[in-house]
Image (cartoon, rainbow, N blue to C red):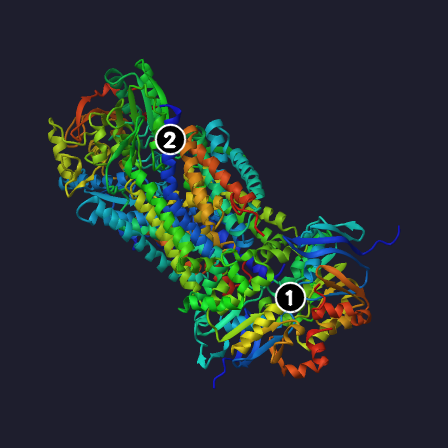
Amino acid sequence: MADVTFLKTKDLKCHFGGIKAVDGVDFTLEKGEIRAIIGPNGAGKSTFVSLLSGRTEATAGEVEFLGENVTRLPAYKRVRRGIAYTFQITNIYKDFPVIENVAIAVQSRLSNSGEKTGAGRIRAEAEKVLARVGLSQFAERKAGELAYGHQRLLEVGMGLALQPELLILDEPTQGLSDSEVSDFCDLVKEIAQNATILLIEHNMDVVMTLAGRITVLNQGRILAEGSPEDIRANRAVQDAYLGRGDE
Amino acid sequence: MGFGPFLFLATLEGLVQASVLVLTAVGLSLVFGVMRVVNVAHGEFFMLGAVIAWFVATNMPGDPAIGFIAALIISPLAVGAVAYVADRLILTRLNYNPEATIVATIGLLYVIQQSVLMTYGADARPVDPPFYYTIRLPWFGYSSYKLFVIAAACVLLGVIWFVLKRTKWGLLMRATQFDRETALAFGIPVRKVYSFVFAIGAGLAAIGAVLIVPIQQAHYLMGLDPLLLSFTVVIIGGLGSIQGTIFAAILIGLSDGILSVFFSPTLAKIVSTLFVAMVLVFKPNGLFAKAKR
Amino acid sequence: MTDKTGNKTFNLTRRTALKGLAAGTSLILSPAVLRHGLAHAGETIKLGAPIHRTGIGAAYGRWYERVANAAVKIINDGGGINGMPIELIIEDDGTDPKRGTEVVEKFATEYKVDAIFGQLFSHVVAAAAPRAGELKVPYLMCSETHQLAAGGFSRYAFQPGITDVKSQIASMAPWVSKNLGKKVTMIYPDYAFGYGHRDFFSAAMKEQGGEVSTLIPVPPTETSFSRYFPQIDPSSDVIYHVMVGPGVLTFVKELGEFFGSSHPAIFGFVDSIEAVDLATPQLSFLEDSYFWEAAPRYAQADQTEFDKFYREAVGVDANGASTSDPKDISTYSHMFSVWETLFAIKSAMEAADYKGVEQKEAFIEALENLGTMEASNEHPQGKKVMDPKTHQAFGVQNISQVKSSKMEVVYTTTIEEGMYEPEVDYSKMSL
Amino acid sequence: MGAGMMKSLILHLAVLVLLFLLQFVISDYAILTLTRMMVLGIFASGFNILFGYTGLLSLGHAMFFGAGVYAAGLPIYHFGWSVPLAFVFAIFMSFVAAVIIGVIALRTVRDSFMILTLMLAQAGYLAILYFNRETGGSEGLTMPQASRSFDFLGLTIDLTDAATRYNIAVLLLAITIVVSFILIQGRYGRLFNAIRENEARTEMLGYNVLTAKLFSFTVSGTIAGMAGAAYAILFGYIGATFAGIQYSIEALLFTLLGGAGTLLGPLLGSILMTTLIDRLSEVTSAYFLFLGLILIALTLWFPKGLLGTIKEKWLPWLT
Amino acid sequence: MAASLEVIGFDTFYGQSQALREFSIRLEGGKVLCLLGRNGAGKTTALKSIMGIIPPRKGKLLIDGNDLSEKPAYEIPKHGIGYVPQGRRLFSELTVRENLEIGLLTRSTGKQALEHALSYFPVLRERINQVSGTLSGGEQTMLAIARALCIEPSVLMLDEPTEGLMPSAIAAIRDVVIKLRDEGKAILLVEQRVDAVIPVADTVAFMDHGEIRETVAIDVLKDNPALLQKYVGV
């Protein structure tokens, strides 16, 4: 059997009433990539990844993951197949201890893969994840009491705990300080050794540091795609950002 | 009796019921629409309105009509004041959190009900109607006061409509309902509007109650039925929509009156309750909701 | 030794180890002991009265309580029972089966009463009576329910004050069919109390060669009634109505509005206007219509000395209203049952020379053997006959006609007219 | 097993043992009333699985209590079924009812869920009235004398005996607590909590949230139904009031007072509230006034209830 | 002379997380100050904090020299701040007139103010009884501005007024902003796109992480593409 495409969308559309948030996107992603999606505000980036993760239902078109059509699968089933999503606005269990946040994700992975879900095992795995994202010292703290940057890391840690095939990071560095951003980039590089990463990002430094390829969305369509250098040089992209591409 | 007059009577009765129901339910709907608060104590405001009407009417010397008119003024004001205080003391402090307000208004329900029990007692007491006159039709007689109730409800609805659509007060409420944050940014004291809306909602229930006590009697347990019926009406009409509420009140009033003539009234209630439940499941914006957005 | 807490329920032999805990717990769980446990056994006769102070039975409960207090006062003023005064303990049962049962339990085990009396609404009785039997405390209901005579309860349950509804209804049918007509439309509450009327009266009419042609059940919580009236069969000779609950006044008012002056004969159970002032302007249509009454609300021309005495003691005037407020109408036709029940307890206890709970069995047997109770101050409604098998007392019933907004008795049944074959024999059951 | 879990287990077992031992020292009345408190405590415990642990506020849980009452009582009354058989049957019927109602009700959320459960319960209550020839309507039915004692595994169990009833209640309470404990300490407990705290996030972690909610709803409804069945067989009377709104609200009140999301909270709430009402009714007829005041006070100042506050402040390991 | 708008040291939080740090600005009448920064930098939060919708935990607010720090939110607009929120937030089920009347509610300025506001946008006059949700995007923005003008503000705050508009509409809005500035109003403008502000701004403040990182005069910015690169990307 020939290599299946890791992730592929065909003419994917999502319309809210008259607004065409995503309007016919053909997109492919290869295993092992770090791909960034950029674009001006309202370009449809978040809607697009919501369609991939199943948070939003597609109006038309298809999503294919590991050779299977997942367009009609509910979100939780896509997660079980390996698509993990981290939220743009920090979305954690604020009243629970940090470790419990991760443990919930670990339990999900273990029980979905039919493994034993003993309390000890879950805790051990959760501790490992916390170590990876550097939050071990806060394990017993209430998640809501963490600094904002640490909450973002926890958000990523929860995605990581699922050991996904594809990790979608929606504006992960938003609100992080410069030093946190660079730590974060290191973390993503490390994660990328085992997983494919799709990243929505505004911070161009981050994008340029991490991404192998960049996809530019504008007005719900793909405007350009290519290596960071190509994109930097692309006139259409600059127009889109500077607002002269409205017509 | 022929079928025609039969239907005619059922319709009249349905309209009387709808008249009282519409006032009560509009109050509930207004509170839900503007404040997003499900007020479980709404039926008790109704009951309180009836009881205060009794106190006013029995302590007012002279013609029953004077007592009645006094009740029509004093009772809604008094009930509104109670609601205003309740909002200030309880609901604002809960920050209008939906779950907490439901539980707290359940508490309020008991507090009002039992306070009335302690002061007014457990008896059902009648209020004299402002006038006695039975209209004799060829097939049956009908109380002229009941026709007055229908007319009064129409007038009051007109007033409500006018206030909401044509006055500064109405605009304040509607602005708060649609977007409280922006309302705040235009100098609308949202919290105060909330308190007043809560008071007005309760006052409307009280007016409905004053109109009904000459027909029914004031009793400390009379609040439950109007509460459930108002819920029904507000759900079918679409939560927070005043027009929908009016439509639904007439629909429910009429159908309840007519259905319970043909079926066992208990069965009619079961069917309508289940029907409402299904509306909630499958058409959560109410039966008359246009597809929005 | 007298327990310091006044609690006499402890078994001293088994409270060694956890003494402190027990004392604490019992204080929390049984606050009542502090108030009522102080009198020593054998000093008073304790009677527990669970009363419908609140809930849908409240209009009745208020008068039941008033009558109970009046009767107890008379008994105590006369030296009590067997030389012991009655200690009357009243608690609200909320007209609720669970609370009603709890109160019965409390009376039986906490207050350790000698007997319980006073519950009226049948759903409360249905829940509470069996528990009284299990706790082996005499339970005297004032409720009209037929559940007792139908064999639903135990040997501890009695109804000595008021005749049950089956008997009341059956004794009405011959008179109705003879004097008013044979074709009847019934309007009755859509719950147990109404079903009794529906079934017993239909059967009794059939026996008389009449028929109940239309049945109109109305939910007890209904607040407006007009829409039910078109179902009334216009060819009926008689409209038979019985309604209970807070909506009764609305019911009769709307019936009047609907019919105006021309209508079939109307026969109602007085329940439809219990606690309602007949002088209300809109009730004028009831003029000339008929009611069943157990005890006539309005003092009759031939009023007995006993009725006069009873009215005075309870504080009710000749119109059945409170002497302090002529607008406050009593539940005259039912509340006498409390009075007569208390005096039945008294005479049974005296017959058994009752001194305390040890003589409970003798007391029960004495209740069964009350036999004929003649009309007297103790039985102002009239003569009663206690059936030892069914534990049900039977008495006379009255049919009254409304004249000038008062009710005049036009016919009084004999006790025999209301008798039926016993369906149970409690006296053979174990105690 | 963690130390916290161990402590929690010991505490719960100790409470159960204490409840068993209490019967040797407390007054007769306390035994009678504590029996009822335990049965209602079981009902509230069932409610708590849904409300306290999963975060779904049902205002119609009396429908399951009522389902249990009638599914146990009617076969005994009409067909003379043996008590154990009727009891098991009632638990099964409550389970079926919970699954069906859950499938419908869980299509809605928040306000709508609360109103919908209220409406469905009201329909159930009216249905009992409507089928009054079978159910006895609002008057209810008194269980026949013959059903008040039965032979079970060679033992004659007399349900008119207070001590017997008390011990059956303790046993059923123990079963409820132990089952709940296992459930809550296990992976479902974590999942329920996660749903309560943040449903959307939980779905995005790969959980089928709807199934989990239905599971919680079913467990909750079945326990409530078992409590109802126990009520019917232990106290020998079935009536429509037990399916009324009042009982839905009592379950909520007990849970809020004792502490939502704690296993012993509902029982504690039931004991305190019933005792309070019992005391107050000696002084006033308007004892429900205090019920209302307590509800308001709880939402304003004590949203976590007694045990919930204790858990938060001092005993974080409490289940 | 006191500044029209002065914000001193706002610290604002969403629950635990801090959204504004030591946020301070000063704005004179007849000037336009632009807040620039990417999504989540705290621009909208800054405006909402000024309006009191999300009250700051710390800091001072002065309008025309009046200290409003302790005032409840609904008092603030009465002292002369008009607010055009992000996404316009019209009362879309109400008519154009009703939307404007909401602007009039809390000040007794009456019909005159309404007429004056409409004088900037003749097209709205034609649609005065139309339900505002049915207006075109550009008209909706105009209405949002007119509504803010109804309270006769000395300070006008606009949050991304040109977002999602056609270029022609953008130009029209821009002209009105310039006109208002020239009439002496102090204008605080939030934008993501530099090109939108270059023609109107006097000063640009770059925000990131809830802080103002740099404040530059517009002439400086025009000549310095490196700054553009740094804060807006590309």
Q: In the picture shown, does residue D20 fall above or below A97? A: above
Residue E184 image offset from top left, x and y in percent? 51, 79
Front in this rendered view, residue D97 or C221: C221
In the displayed structure image, the side of residue E44 where residue B250 appears, left or right: left
Q: Residue at x 71, y 73 (%)?
A: E233
Of D47 and C152, the residue lying toward us: D47
- What is the quadrant of residue B254 in the picture? top left
The disc numbered 1 marks a residue on which chain?
Answer: E
- Can residue E2 be seen here? The reply is yes
In the picture, measured across the screen, residue C426 lies left or right of residue C84, that is right
Answer left or right for E135 relative to D21.
right
Question: Few, some or many C-alpha atoms within 10 Å of disc 1 (few <14, some 14-19, many ≥20)?
Answer: few
Measured as percent of width and height from the top left, residue B87 is found at: 39, 59
Q: Which mark is residue B8?
A: 2
Chain of the residue under label 2: B
Instruction: Look at mark 1 in the image and give the residue it sits on.
Output: E168
Q: Is residue D229 visible?
A: no
Q: Quadrant of residue B252?
A: top left
Where is the C terminus of chain C found, in terms of image quarters? top left
Q: Residue furthest bottom?
A: E1
Task: Describe the element under mark 1 as helix, strand or loop.
Answer: helix
Q: Position of residue C324 (x, y in %)?
A: 15, 43
The residue lying toward the viewer, choosing from C391 and A188, is A188
Looking at numbered disc 2 in the image, what kind of residue is underneath it? Phe
Judge the density around disc 2: few (<14), some (14-19), many (≥20) Cα neighbours within 10 Å: few
In the figure, is residue D315 to the left or right of D278? right
Q: How far across and down, in percent of the image, does residue A163 sit?
A: 74, 60
